[in-house]
Amino acid sequence: MDRATAQWFKNQLQMMGPTYIKIGQFISSRRDIFDEKVVEALRELQDAVEPSPTEESRRLISERLGTSISKVSSIELTPVACASIGQVHIGQLKNGKKIAIKIRRPGVQDLLAMDLTILSGILSILELLKTENISETRELLDDFSQWFEDEMDYTREIQNYVLLKQNAKPSLLLPEFYEQLCQEDFIIMSYVPSLKIRVAKMSMSMADRRALAILIMDTFISQLVVDGVMHGDPHEGNIGMNRDGQVVLYDMGNVIMVSQSTRNKLRQLLFEIVSSNYDEAISIMKKVDLFEVRDEAKVRGLLEKYSQYIQSVDVKVFTSMSKDSSMRGDLPIKFSGTVFRIVRVFGLLEGICKDLDPAFSYEPVLAKYMQIMGGGTNDYLTYRMMSDLRKLARLLVDNLEDRT
């Protein structure tokens, strides 16, 4: 694809609204999969969406601040970042502190509702045509709708910040909020400058780039399987690195939350997949409400390929499966909306990490978690012990039944 066509494609997505911009943001994160010219064009969707008119921004900021505007000494009306749902302006409080002001785009809710209605209508037609796996697509759209709804309410971002901050390591930096000045469509936070990862890498050695890739992936795996609260939208516009080498995360409008019980099972599932114990992995998947195993043989094949993918992060691993006629038709496993969101997060992260280090692999990160699972935290050891005791009890019962 030539640059002109790639730019045209980007412009079409931008004109089509927030739903399609999100799709473009995902494509732009995967240089290892998609055409380079398309990736470069769509990267503009990370923070260069057309801003709202200056006068409209002035009016919105003034209205939302109300009497609190007396606390602000200056505001830059030209936004520093424009996304599908909102845009960010830089300002300064009268106490000298620099702030970031995020306002929701006027009318974006109506645009989103229209997009989702159109997509729902298309799915209804496909259902009438008895298209394969359409029910899963319908459920995915429902989850996507909820995901967007959450992002629309900026007060939810403050709640998510509190959850992420509780477990944040020193290597992770999050902007802090001025909660008393925030509203559903308007938030003020501390200004936290950083370099985009693709810019920061230009002055880094290969060893430092490799270390940063591992740090970024480790941050998110830890959020998922240890903390149970993970940032849900780490596209390139939402992640950076500051001068102290800390990973900086922006836009906490969406997080993925996983219960302690499910985290224990996910750790065990990860352990079994990496250890090539696929039958045990399938057994665990059957016990987690995130999955519905429909065809064990096909799922086993998927897990074998995924085990290889963990080592290389190369999508070509799955090429043979797409050509295998036995793998076509109905999906052998049904994923919950939560799993799709987790997959999307790691798809975005893989793109960032592969851009930093083309040889990036999950192995150095997972080695740490294999060690943790070997030594274990108390809650995980308790889970493993109870699980092993249940297996032992089943074996004893089966043995007694065989003797009688």
Image (cartoon, rainbow, N blue to C red):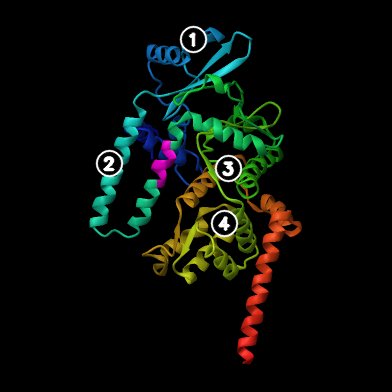
Q: From where the camera sits, is residue 173 visible?
A: yes
Mark 1 or mark 2: whose residue is earlier in sequence: 1
Residues at marks 1 and 2 touching, judged by CB atoms closer than 8 Å: no
- Mark 4 highlights which residue? 309
Q: Tell me residue 70's x, y (percent).
A: 53, 7
The answer to which image quadrant residue 13 occupies is top left
Residue 67, numbered circle:
1
Query: Which of label 1 and label 4 is nearer to you?
Result: 1
Q: Is residue 223 left or right of residue 123?
A: right
Q: Is residue 366 left or right of residue 122?
A: right
Q: Tell me residue 172's x, y (percent).
A: 66, 34
Query: Which of label 1 and label 3 is nearer to you?
Result: 1
Q: Amino acid at mark 4?
A: Tyr
Q: Amino acid at mark 1?
A: Thr
Q: Main secondary structure of the magenta part?
A: helix
Residues at marks 4 and 2 touching, judged by CB atoms closer than 8 Å: no
Q: Is residue 148 magenta?
A: yes
Q: CA distance from mark 1 to mark 3?
A: 36 Å
53 relative to 47, above or below:
above
Q: CA distance from mark 1 to mark 2?
A: 41 Å
Query: Which of label 4 and label 3 is nearer to you?
Result: 3
Residue 118, numbered circle:
2
Residue drawn 44% across the image and 67% down it: 294
Residue drawn 48% across the image and 14% down it: 65
Q: Which residues are magenta?
A: 143-149
Residue 230, numbered circle:
3
Q: CA distance from mark 1 to mark 4?
A: 55 Å
